[in-house]
Amino acid sequence: MTARVGVVTFPGSLDDRDAARAVRRAGAQAVPLWHGDRGLRGVDAVILPGGFSYGDYLRCGAIARFAPVMADLVPAARAGLPVLGICNGFQILCEAHLLPGALTHNARLRFINREVTVRIERDGTPWTGGYERGQEITVVLKSGQGSYLADAATLTRLEADGQVVARYTGGNPNGSAHDIAGVTNPAGNVVGLMPHPEHAIDPLTGPGSDGLGFFTSVARALVAR
Amino acid sequence: MSAQTTPVPGTVPGADTVAVAGATPERSQPYAELGLTREEYQRIRGLLGRRPTDPELALYSVMWSEHCSYKSSRVYLRQFADKAPPANGEGGGALLAGIGHNAGVVDIGQGYAVTFKIESHNHPSYVEPFQGAATGVGGIVRDILAMGARPVAVMDSLRFGPADAPDTARVLPGVVGGISFYGNCLGLPNIGGELAFDPCYAGNPLVNALCVGVMRHEDLRFAAARGAGNKVILFGARTGPDGIGGASVLASASFGAGAAAKRPSVQVGDPFMEKLLVECCLELGAAGLLAGIQDLGAAGVSCATAELAAGGGSGMSVNLDLVPLRDASLGPAEILMSESQERMMAIVEPRHVERFAAICARWDVPATVIGEVTGTGRLEMTWRGEVVVDIAPETAASQGPVYDRPAVRPASQDALAADGPARLPRPAPGELGGTLLALLRWPDLADKTWVTEQYDRHVLGDTVLAAPENAGVIRVDEQTGLGVALATDGNGRYSRLDPYAGAQLALAEAYRNVAATGARPVAVTNCLNFGSPEDPGVMWQFAEAVRGLADGCAFLGTPVTGGNVSFYNQTGQVPINPTPVVGVLGILPDVRRRLSIRFRRAGARLVLLGRTGEDFGGSAWAWAVHGHLGGSPPAVDLGAERALAAVLASAAQDGLLAAAHDLSDGGLAVALAESCLAGATGVQVSLPGDPFTTLFSESPARVVAEVSPGARAALAALCERHLVPLTDLGTVGGDRLDVAGCFSIALDELAAARAGVLPALFG
């Protein structure tokens, strides 16, 4: 069987095409999901892509979390559905309280588009199963509000429970606490990532193909299930 | 917002109708405040056979503004069509739509077409840098959208006053921030452009934005209202008081005192609405619901209605009461002049209106039927039940005034030409390394990451090359690898010395940049930035530049498909350096074979293609090191450019080259440094001639290239066939830029020289 991975398009989503392309490159089927529709069309996993949902005019992700599709996604995620939020998708997952913490303005208050190296700190999630813990990969950071923030107790808990999925190495680009580039929920099925793995699936159009592992990981995890 | 409303001077909302105008022929009207001359006003009266109503006066004032009517440039721009080369034939290159449309459209083969255009937003970007630059991006994107294409990338050609001037610290971060804000939120990769500084741009920054879009041939659309009974639909953002008179007030006059008072004339951008508009328009087109479409840019509803009606040769009636307003107090003249952003106008058959509305609703895009196409040949508009506009649309759209303004070569041109760079002291061999480092610290040649890092270059997933490469390259078809390359170039110093040659050098550089990726250059767009056309010296510069560009395009077989003229770039009596910016589009049959500037493989051979002469007039060295501008610009050799491009296209196709970098500002030395740093590898070079000339001369028609393993002989044969000189320079490898007998500089030192320059200036 082929895994079916939903990609949600909100008004202002920009990297939905790229996420769908990455899903296909990983051998899975990309299923478009529309923000205004109820139901998840029976998909096995969901990606919330990057972009500027609703223009990010209020607070990143603050409006998207109220989209009709989220009413079905939130309980499904709590029940174990693999969900990956990339950049704006990460912000939406935080706003929806599926992930702890928040994302705020970069330390220098400017948008940054840069190739960054991150270390995979937690393997074994449906999205990182194909990586080894400690593996360093090069992906693309592009965000204006990518600085991960949480209170001290939350950060301590995230570190203790292994909920930090990826950490910037070779310099903190945006002021994120503990150099955090991505986190997961305690169950490990919901992952938020600030840099974009879907822009690193082909050396022709990105820094390499290191990012493909997120998509092949989920495709394999779903087929094995 | 109402506090910012700028009423059209002298108008009384609600009062002036066609009937009133007919009955009060002697009433005085504020034509001068709207930028019209007495003769132009009289001409409007003559065309109408009465005085215009206030709304009609508003409409003509924006449509006949320099920005919209090209009244001072039109007599020259004809050369682009008159001298246009025949279509460039096989594998694409034929023009599907040329000058006069929203943007030119070029066949690139496999059923695809590309549309691209560059446009200025200079004056708004000085008054309010962030919004001025942001809306510049938004405007050019809608031009591309109006042709039926999906916008796929943007580029920006930016010029500012001295990098360390206090006002540049206000303007540059604002402009870059505005482009970043708008383009990133809209989801278009920014793939390159230019950044240059010169005191002449201190009060007149140049912000030229380019957009490129892709479509299938069958999706091509034109701005024409045809079919009586078809509906006129205004969709997108609501109309507010922003940007009223932008075209006439801002773009068509030069700045003196009181620039701040013009701030309300700058529009405010909403890239989120534009993103929705893009997706909505593409879905409307795919569903076959568009009988005609036009974007609303400068001159807003005036321009869209007049051009659609004139383009279709029909008539149109519009009820201005139906235009959705952000500010209910707007009168008809203000509605007509508003430059509120993110609006489009469509002509739709009545049977399609319901589906049209449904698609707009799905994208949360407001859409309103405001009128219909008629068979009368008139553009009629009503407001509160009264006829306020009744004109022949072509009189506004295409029959504006045309001026053949006096053009006189300034006497100072001779002295400038006589003061050549030969008198400048040249560095001794031992000082050449220091000269290179000085050039790399010069803001024009410094690392531009501070700027380009603020732009998303990855979105859409088809960016193959972006800044700091020779040109941006976008993949069009994922299966076949078909793609396009785009570069913009301009050099105000060269054009100041000789505008004819300067325009050709801009063309040659963009052409060469595209060719250096392995693409075949096929078409041209241009943005002509000049001072006041009322200055005969400026008019001479303009005439010479257009003649040079038209002749150059004819020779190279690359037609001008469209573009933009920006006059009045001057503060007081001092015009900017004439700055024609040229964009060239090329076709890459397979983007996997593109050439990057990055040197790659240790041990690979390094070659110079082309001939080096003594070309230092207007050069980076003369200007950056000596503050000297004089003599003649580099000698143009378009035959050599064409031959070099043919070599590069073949060599890329056959895999003979591993990297290539065009030589321009700063010559071979700067190109070597850039390619070494991009590829993180050094080179060992032995110079063939006089070291200073070989390193820093700016002779055109040259590239430095890394040869693929074992390909030296095949490359030499190819060069011989095309009569392109090939010179061995040395080998790739190590971690130093090593020039035998001159200098050896560690890559780290090169990087350090370039890296900190812009951050130190702009934070």
Image (cartoon, rainbow, N blue to C red):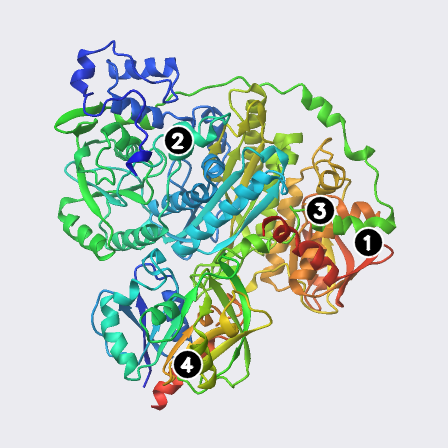
Q: Looking at this view, is A213 or B146 the one in front?
A: A213
In contact (CB < 8 Å): disc 2 and disc 1? no
Tag 1 residue: B687
Q: Looking at this view, is B511 or B444 the one in front?
A: B444
In the rendered image, the vertical position of residue B313 relative to residue A223, given as above or below: above
Q: Secondary structure at mark 1?
A: loop
Q: Is residue B740 left or right of residue B147?
A: right
Give the spatial CA distance, label 3 vs label 2.
38 Å
Chain that bears disc 1 = B
Which of the 4 image quarters holds residue B576?
Answer: top right
In contact (CB < 8 Å): disc 3 and disc 2? no
Q: Nearer the viewer, mark 1 or mark 3?
A: 3
In the rendered image, the vertical position of residue B503 relative to residue B144, given as above or below: above
**Residue type marked 1:** Leu
Q: Whole-percent x and y of residue B11?
A: 27, 22
Tag 4 residue: A127
In contact (CB < 8 Å): disc 1 and disc 3? no
Which residue lies at the image location 31% right of the left edge and 84% below the top edge? Answer: A80
Give the spatial CA distance, label 1 vs label 4.
53 Å
**Residue type marked 2:** Ala
As drawn, the residue found furthest toward the bottom would be: A224
Q: Secondary structure at mark 4?
A: loop
Tag 2 residue: B247
